[in-house]
């Protein structure tokens, strides 16, 4: 339970306190995180009034992944760009909604970070008023020259300097990590500030929830099907069966499991042999948060998500993500080593 004093800690104060632990810090990352909080407030305002404004529904085009672009999705993409483009803290950006690397306009100064983001994850749920979110990832620039290049964006997740997400639900919550734990903040709309509500978040070692789209069951690898069949069984001697909870909004599913424990997975299928979710915009940032909170994230093929080296901006990967013991349990099945597969 957060202490009374934590309720009075704004996200700005918390970020500045973290910066003070690093005397050599320039303050650019601190300000960049606060820029993200500003963008989140703007998007949250529009999400909360979406039913009253002419921004629901389809925008009439598709994004680089072939998904229909929702009007609010488009709004969020532009809002983030407009908050970030002129700060002098970024060398480039990349969005799930944009096919190519986003350059900083020539009239603005550039900085030493690259910003990657999914502006509105779960946007297919917008019209149904289901919780949706923004996911972001920050890397240091690794190339020479003032402007960022594709190489700056195509870095493995273990090089991230920060990652986080914003959940627009009954309340707006921003969760982030800079590699020193995970912290969550809830937006108080009456004062327009994010207040520390979830300090030092830790995922339970194991949970009672599994989250996946079981529509693809028959196109999964038999090892994945065996795992799902097993966790559904009631073995009173060792454990209770897991409960299925799948919202279809990655941020929502992940946030719930981070708080209560559990596993989210989207394995490879016959239709999507490389999975469905995007490595740079979704999996790498959430994997960093999961690991910082004591969890685990793998691709089901023997690889840690944070060790995958992207070759394209919109590369996909399968994923098993969540509480450490739950993910390790799944990995035993994926290696074909669980006794349940041999009976």
Image (spheres, rainbow, N blue to C red):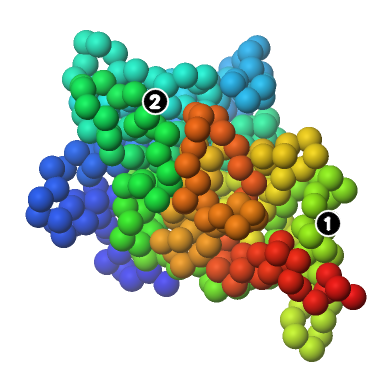
Residue 184 position within the rendered picture, expressed as x and y whole percent measured from the top left: 40, 56
Which structural element holds mark 1? Answer: helix
The residue under label 1 is 222
Residue 122 position within the rendered picture, expressed as x and y whole percent measured from the top left: 62, 37
Q: Residues within 10 Å of mark 1 (few under 14, many from 20)?
A: some
Which structural element holds mark 2? Answer: helix
Give the residue drawn at x 67%, y 32%: 124
Mark 1 to mark 2 CA distance (whole Å): 37 Å
Q: Nearer the viewer, residue 153 or 163?
A: 153
Q: Nearer the viewer, residue 270 or 193?
A: 270
User: Quarter holding the N terminus?
Assistant: bottom left
- Figure check: 246 above or below 67: below
Task: Place residue 130 in its image quadrant.
Answer: top right
Task: Place residue 45 in its image quadrant.
Answer: top left
165 lies left or right of 300: left
Give the residue drawn at x 27%, y 30%: 143
Q: Residues within 10 Å of mark 2 (few under 14, many from 20)?
A: some
Give the residue drawn at x 24%, y 47%: 12
Residue 35 position within the rendered picture, expressed as x and y whole percent measured from the top left: 29, 35
Q: Nearer the viewer, residue 133 or 102?
A: 102
The residue under label 2 is 150
174 lies left or right of 105: right
- Figure check: 335 above or below 86: below
Q: Nearer the viewer, residue 134 or 284?
A: 284
């Amino acid at each position: 339970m957060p202490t009374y004093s934590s309720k009075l800690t704004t996200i700005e104060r918390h970020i500045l306190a973290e910066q003070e632990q690093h005397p050599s810090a320039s303050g650019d990352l601190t300000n960049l995180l606060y820029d993200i909080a500003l963008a989140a407030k703007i998007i949250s305002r529009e999400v909360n009034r979406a039913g009253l404004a002419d921004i629901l529904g389809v925008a009439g085009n598709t994004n680089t992944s072939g998904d229909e672009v929702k009007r609010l999705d488009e709004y969020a993409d532009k809002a983030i760009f407009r908050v970030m483009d002129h700060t002098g803290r970024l060398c480039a950006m990349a969005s799930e909604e944009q096919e190519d690397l986003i350059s900083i306009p020539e009239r603005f100064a550039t900085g030493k970070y690259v910003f990657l983001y999914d502006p509105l994850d779960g946007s297919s749920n917008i019209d149904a008023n289901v919780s949706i979110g923004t996911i972001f990832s920050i890397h240091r620039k690794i190339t020479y020259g003032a402007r960022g290049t594709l190489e700056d964006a195509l870095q493995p997740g273990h090089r991230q300097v920060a990652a986080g997400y914003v959940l627009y639900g009954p309340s707006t919550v921003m969760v982030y990590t800079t590699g020193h734990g995970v912290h969550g903040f809830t937006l108080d709309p009456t004062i327009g500030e994010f207040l520390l509500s979830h300090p030092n978040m830790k995922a339970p070692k194991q949970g009672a929830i599994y989250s996946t789209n079981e529509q693809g069951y028959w196109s999964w690898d038999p090892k994945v099907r065996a795992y799902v069949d097993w966790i559904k069984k009631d073995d009173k001697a060792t454990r209770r069966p897991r409960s299925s909870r799948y919202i279809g909004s990655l941020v929502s599913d992940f946030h719930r499991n981070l708080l209560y424990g559990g596993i989210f997975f989207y394995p490879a299928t016959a239709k999507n042999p490389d999975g469905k979710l995007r490595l740079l915009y979704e999996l790498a940032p959430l994997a960093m948060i999961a690991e910082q909170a004591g969890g685990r994230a793998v691709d089901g093929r023997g690889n840690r998500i944070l060790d995958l080296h992207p070759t394209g901006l919109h590369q996909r990967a399968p994923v098993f993500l969540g509480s450490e013991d739950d993910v390790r349990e799944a990995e035993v099945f994926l290696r074909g080593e669980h006794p349940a597969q041999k009976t």
